[in-house]
Image (cartoon, coloured by chain):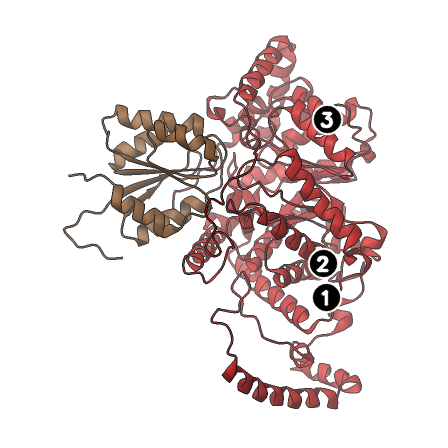
Chain colours: A red, B brown
Amino acid sequence: MDRNDKKSASNKANQGNDLATIRKKQLEWEEKLKQSEASLPPRPVKFTTLSDMEVPLLSTPVDLHNDGFDYLKDLGFPGEYPYTRGVQRNMYRGKLWTMRQFAGFASAAETNQRFKLLLEHGQTGLSTAFDMPTLMGLDADSPRSKGEVGKCGVAVSSLEDMEELFKGIPLGEVTTSMTINAPAIVILAMYFAVAEKQGVPKQKVRGTLQNDILKEYIAQKEWIYPIEPAVKLVIDTIEYTTQHYANWNSVSISGYHIREAGATAVQELAFTLADGLGYVDESLKRGMTIDEFAPRLSFFFDVHNDFFEEIAKFRAARRIWARIMREKYQAKDPKSWMLRTHAQTAGVSLTAQQPYNNIVRVAVQAMAGILGGTNSLHTNSMDETLALPTDEAVMIALRTQQIIAEESGVANVIDPFGGSYFMETLTNRVEREALNYIQKIDEMGGIIKSIEKGFPQTEIANSAYHFQRQLEIQEKVMVGVNKYQAKESVRKMETLYIDRKVEKQQIERLVELRRKRPAQAHQQALNRVKDAAINGTNLMEPILEAVKAYATLQEICDTMKTVYGEYRESGSF
Amino acid sequence: MITSANEKKIRVLVAKPGLDGHDRGAKVIARALRDAGFEVIYTGLHQTPEMIVNAAIEEDVQVVGLSILSGAHNALVPEIIDGIKKEGLMDTLFVVGGIIPAEDIPSLKSLGVHMVFTPGASLQDVVDYIRTHSPARS
């Protein structure tokens, strides 16, 4: 009540009678609307966002007023608390978002070529996709890796592969993002080892490790260890990079996979922020102070089809994070308040049917991400629902970003939707609903407990099923799939084919490595990894030694497995 | 959907072979089949071919649905089909769903896969196909 009273008092000065007049005029307009709709009724569809939120036909200053909108408190200025309008003062005038295309396939040598191609064409950061065995901490020659080597990303089984992957790329001059989670600590050690061999000073090593294990249990499902030791490894990397690699982003707290698994925009936002708070709590328990590590936490969100909902999501994300960091955690460094984020267009929105349409979807989604103020962006290639992208498809995706940046004019102005009656009320609504989820998770005892109870997993599965049912009855439309289908529309496209040869060659490389590496050194290093795992000390140093001794990814991960055990999920659906 | 008491429910195993963790499709399909009145068993993630063969035998299913989005289908699917057939369940209906390039579909079919559903397939089509084609078991 207080808040509203104050609000109306302050609004009176500048709006006063205006609001009353607007209300009156709006009622009159609504009467006329009824008459118009008698002859031209609304189309027989549900007017909802992609996540099924009701959308008003029209928003006015009355809605803003009812929401208690307060410019300075709710938006403020760019680069300033609560960062609703963006984290940089001059946003894209100072620096365009980083155009960062995710790449990785087949062997390290082939991915190295793709990286160089992207850099030559104006890409400004690297982003590495690893294959399934690597994501699961398995070497290429494990029986469980059969058929998977190099398929969904690049195979990295040892430091030798990592050296090959970044050969000829000066690591002091690029920023590298690595999408890896369960074995992230090992891959990070390999990257640091390569940078060290190149002679790059530690403060010049820049990049981001995804390293977000919580969302693996929630959505992406590439895990190794039970939750508790897995989170401990994440905190080890946060602690180590905080001390030694000041410009490394230790965790990229990811909503992307949560959304792709079927979450709504609100669920994506809520579960991602809750994961972030989980890492904050665990890092504090380790004895770090909030301002030591929070500035290096970064985020990664999906940008889906619903234009306004997505923009609102990015704006709400920054505001919620800033407020929680400052008010609840008492962070003092503004960098701890800032939610810096990467974004990727929605893989699930792409269709195998009439695949060229995907170029348009990606452009619209990219535009939403940019208008939402993302700091970095990956645009999907049109063929990614069929296979990994071809060079040509990747180039169109990159050009899409360049066209938006250089031709559309959107990068000239900051947060152009700020102040929009609809956008502000939508941002408020997304924020409120996300905070409700975050509170619910809090009441369950935090994100780890809620994952153990299966709460986010079930919520996401319910949303995924709900959406699929909506598609079945055309309550939601996917052009070319459940409406406007065309005959012979599918798969008239060259796709990238990963030869089984890659697997054979990768296995041969590994056999050769095992033969030629000094026999004792890696075994001793592995023993130290095991000791550290048993003693509960930080594993980063021993793992660094192990990778430098050319112990393989799986040897290191299996060593920890003997101490930590393995995670198992029930087959509920 | 309601099935009459004396009509035996069709038993379906929904399985996720390989390392890929994309279980959205498998779970949505499992729910849809359950809602359509089938008896559905879902294996959970990261199953080896051997684990899937064992589950199919133990659960005595008529239908095996394999969900693969990682590109490992050519390596994994034949092992599963051969394993189940070796156990004598010759009439099992094999359905594959996921990201399967068009050029791989004929070879999968020649290896014993009855139907491949790719992105955009409707739940109703999957339900109808299984209802029409699943073998009778006493």
Q: Residue furthest front?
A: A487
Whichever of labels 1 and 3 marks the residue nearer the N terminus, that label is 3
Left or right: A113 in relation to A173: left
Q: Which residue is mark 2?
A: A371
Total numbered badges shown on the rendered structure: 3
Q: Residues within 10 Å of mark 2 (few under 14, many from 20)?
A: many
Residue A541 can be seen, yes or no: no
Q: Chain for mark 2?
A: A
Which quarter of the figure has residue B3? bottom left
Marks 1 and 2 close (CB-CB < 8 Å): yes
Tell me which corner region of the image, top left, top right, bottom left or bottom right, holds residue A304. bottom right
To which residue does mark 1 refer? A417
- Mark 1 or 2, nearer chain start: 2
Viewer-side residue, A225 vs A480: A480
Q: Residues within 10 Å of mark 3 (few under 14, many from 20)?
A: many
**Vertical order, A511 against A4 (above or below):** above
Rounded to the nearest angstrom, the CA distance separating label 1 from label 2 is 8 Å
Asked whether residue B92 appears in the rendered view, the answer is: yes
- Kindly identify which residue carries mark 3: A166
Check chain identity for marks 1 and 2: say if they share one: yes
Give the percent coordinates (x, y) of residue B58.
Answer: 26, 34
Q: Callout 3, which amino acid?
A: Phe
Q: Quadrant of the N terminus of chain A?
A: bottom right
